[in-house]
Image (cartoon, rainbow, N blue to C red):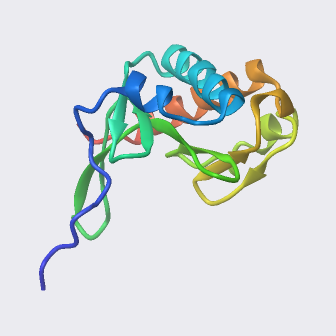
Amino acid sequence: MAKAELKTKKTTASVASFLSAIPDDARREDCRRLVKLMQQAIGAEPKMWGEHVIGFGDYHYKYESGRENDWFVAGFSPRKANITLYLMSGAARHSAILERLGKHKVGKGCLYIKQLSDIELPVLKELVESCARELKKKSVS
């Protein structure tokens, strides 16, 4: 059986061009602010992953099955209903930080926010940094 190929991969597409193409002014500005925040929190330049995800940092992981993959440490995508943040160590396990974040929803590895004005940005930065530290401990080099 052939190994499943990931559709979302790091590309050379321009992050600035992607952000400029976001039609809603407020969403576009929120995303530009998120790029700055996540770049500071992760300490890595933003890169496009696929057509709609901006990722920061590099993370190599290995499943117990032996399957390995490269991914980003944290990233986000401006979806229609929410800005989806991908925190690879899992946002839900940081409940103490999430309690202080503001209005949001949490999925298994995702954090959903409508707009940045709904949340506390210093708390979001703390969450991203905490997730990145946790992931670094697990990373396979």
Foreground residue, 105 or 73?
A: 105
Residue at 82% x, 31% y: name it: 119
Q: Is residue 52 above or below residue 46?
A: below
Q: Is residue 84 left or right of residue 19?
A: right
**Quarter of image, res 6:** bottom left
User: Could you tell me residue 105's position as x and y percent?
Assistant: 77, 52
**Quarter of image, res 129:** top right
User: Could you tell me residue 55's position as x and y percent?
Assistant: 42, 35
User: Could you tell me residue 26's position as x and y percent?
Assistant: 71, 28
Give the quarter of the figure containing the C terminus.
top left
Give the quarter of the figure containing the N terminus.
bottom left
Q: Is residue 77 above or below residue 122?
A: below
Foreground residue, 38 or 18?
A: 18
Q: Is residue 62 left or right of residue 18?
A: left
Residue furthest left as drawn: 2
Residue at 48% x, 26% y: name it: 20
Residue at 42% x, 32% y: name it: 18
Foreground residue, 32 or 64?
A: 32
User: Could you tell me residue 138's position as x and y percent?
Assistant: 41, 42
Q: How many marks?
A: 0
Residue furthest bottom as drawn: 1
Foreground residue, 131 or 35?
A: 35
Residue at 52% x, 36% y: name it: 134
Residue furthest front as drawn: 23
